Image: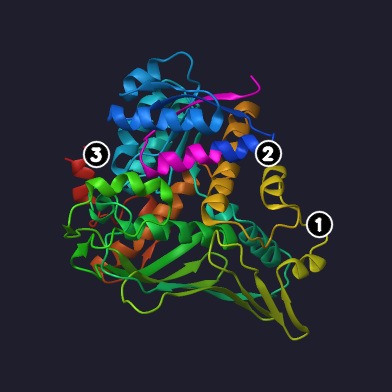
């Protein structure tokens, strides 16, 4: 098998972004995936996704309207899951039970217990489970990781990850403001916790607090939709949403390496958006631009400042993988591409990595455990805020601390 026959499950905005990712992968000439089917409970959404796939890939995939029908389709070898977070568990488990590998969008699950159940199912059946996480695939983040690993900053003391500013508008879709569906705070910050573990390895302790910054969200002037793929949701947008899920959090993470990470994410407050990602060490600092924008990382040391491609002179062995190089260029650590194009490119890289792992019987860059730890770090902030003390990653992974999640687990049928 040279190309993996895949079914896309979940044909909303994220599903359509994954179709565009497959189109970007096809344009590289390195594609190892065939989109043979799409699946959504809403037939009209599935048909619309099939039509889009036909437009950009040249072939119309089959349409299914239940996961059971898709799992039973002998022409499907693997699944790409892009449903809302609360649906990940009931979609992923049947696929793994049928020994069909799964690439599951982040956050991997609604709770730690749900993620562990998926990982256990993958282990018991010997089936690959991968987590779709695209921020680390961005070439500037690949460069940042190389700078850290090469010791160009010396002993690293701390990292800052800060984003604030926005409005009281609904962010992307109403369900992202509902705690039992997978809240927007976790949905966004899990990107950052994955970047943190990508840079520095394992989390040790988590101390923080999550909160709802905007008690009512409005759809006036349209929701905040960062990608054209979500425009289909606009017709179904209510005038207001009263959030039950935290949209904001402030936290301090201590990594097992000793690095401290300060994180703040507060999408509230009109006037200006504030953003910073920086890493600070004994020999200098590194400023990393906002993801998927193509800005140049800046390395500052006593000897001077280097930006973007200039940093490559300090890293003679650095190179992007073949898919990333085809999309962003061999020296694409800074680039000038429209957001949808860079977004599709990074999704293409994660899709190629998943199919490579399945076809070669190897390990994906982010497996189920990697998705679990990024999720546990975010949920640890909420748990810490609830009990008023730091929590350890071990406590999170074993559910020794879980009071914030217990009612969610009952809703999922994982607790009595």
- Residue hosting label 2: 28
* Distance from Cα at disc 1 to Cα at disc 2: 23 Å
- Residue 184 position by quadrant: bottom left
- Residue found farthest to the bottom: 302
Residue at x 31% of width, y 72% of height: 268
* Place of residue 310 in the rendered image (x, y in percent of width and height, measured from the top left): 77, 70
Range of residues picked out in magenta? 1-21
- Residue hosting label 3: 414
- Residue hosting label 1: 317
Disc 1 element: loop
Residue at x 16% of width, y 40% of height: 416
* Place of residue 408 in the rendered image (x, y in percent of width and height, measured from the top left): 22, 48
Up-down relation of residue 377 to residue 252 (above or below): above
Disc 1 versus disc 2: nearer the observer: 2
Disc 3 versus disc 1: nearer the observer: 1
Tell how many labels: 3
């Amino acid at each position: 098998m040279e190309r993996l026959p895949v079914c896309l499950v979940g044909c909303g905005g994220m599903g359509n972004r994954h179709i565009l990712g497959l189109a970007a992968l096809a344009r590289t000439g390195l594609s190892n995936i065939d989109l043979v089917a799409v699946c959504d409970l809403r037939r009209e959404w599935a048909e619309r996704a099939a039509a889009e796939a036909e437009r950009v890939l040249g072939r119309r995939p089959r349409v299914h309207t239940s996961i059971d029908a898709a799992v039973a389709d002998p022409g499907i070898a693997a699944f790409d899951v892009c449903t809302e977070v609360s649906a990940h568990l009931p979609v992923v488990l049947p696929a793994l039970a049928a020994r069909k590998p799964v690439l599951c969008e982040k956050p991997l699950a609604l709770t730690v217990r749900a993620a562990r159940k998926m990982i256990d199912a993958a282990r018991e059946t010997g089936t690959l489970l991968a987590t779709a996480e695209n921020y680390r695939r961005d070439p500037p983040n690949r460069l940042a990781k190389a700078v850290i690993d090469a010791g160009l900053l010396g002993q690293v003391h701390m990292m800052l990850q800060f984003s604030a500013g926005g409005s009281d508008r609904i962010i992307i879709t109403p369900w992202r403001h509902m705690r039992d569906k997978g809240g927007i705070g976790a949905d966004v910050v899990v990107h950052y916790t994955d970047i943190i573990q990508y840079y520095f390895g394992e989390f040790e302790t988590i101390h923080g607090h999550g909160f709802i910054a905007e008690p009512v969200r409005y759809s006036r002037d349209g929701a905040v939709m960062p990608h054209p793929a979500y425009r289909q949701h606009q017709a179904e947008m209510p005038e207001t949403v009263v959030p039950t899920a935290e949209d904001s959090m402030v936290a301090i993470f201590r990594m097992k390496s000793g690095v401290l990470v300060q994180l703040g994410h507060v999408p509230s407050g009109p006037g200006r958006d504030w953003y910073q990602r920086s890493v600070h060490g004994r020999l200098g600092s590194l400023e990393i631009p906002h993801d998927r924008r193509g800005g140049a990382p800046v390395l500052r040391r006593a000897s001077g400042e280097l930006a973007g491609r200039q940093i490559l002179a300090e890293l003679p062995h650095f190179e992007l993988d073949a898919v990333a190089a085809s999309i962003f260029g061999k020296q694409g650590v800074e680039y000038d591409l429209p957001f949808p194009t860079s977004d599709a490119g990074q999704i293409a890289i994660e899709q190629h990595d998943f199919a490579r792992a399945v076809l070669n019987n190897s390990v994906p860059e982010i497996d189920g455990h990697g998705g679990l730890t990024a999720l546990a770090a975010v949920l640890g902030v909420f748990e810490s805020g609830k009990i008023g003390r730091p929590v350890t990653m071990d406590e999170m992974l074993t559910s020794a601390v879980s009071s914030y999640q217990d009612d969610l687990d009952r809703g999922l049928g994982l607790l009595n």
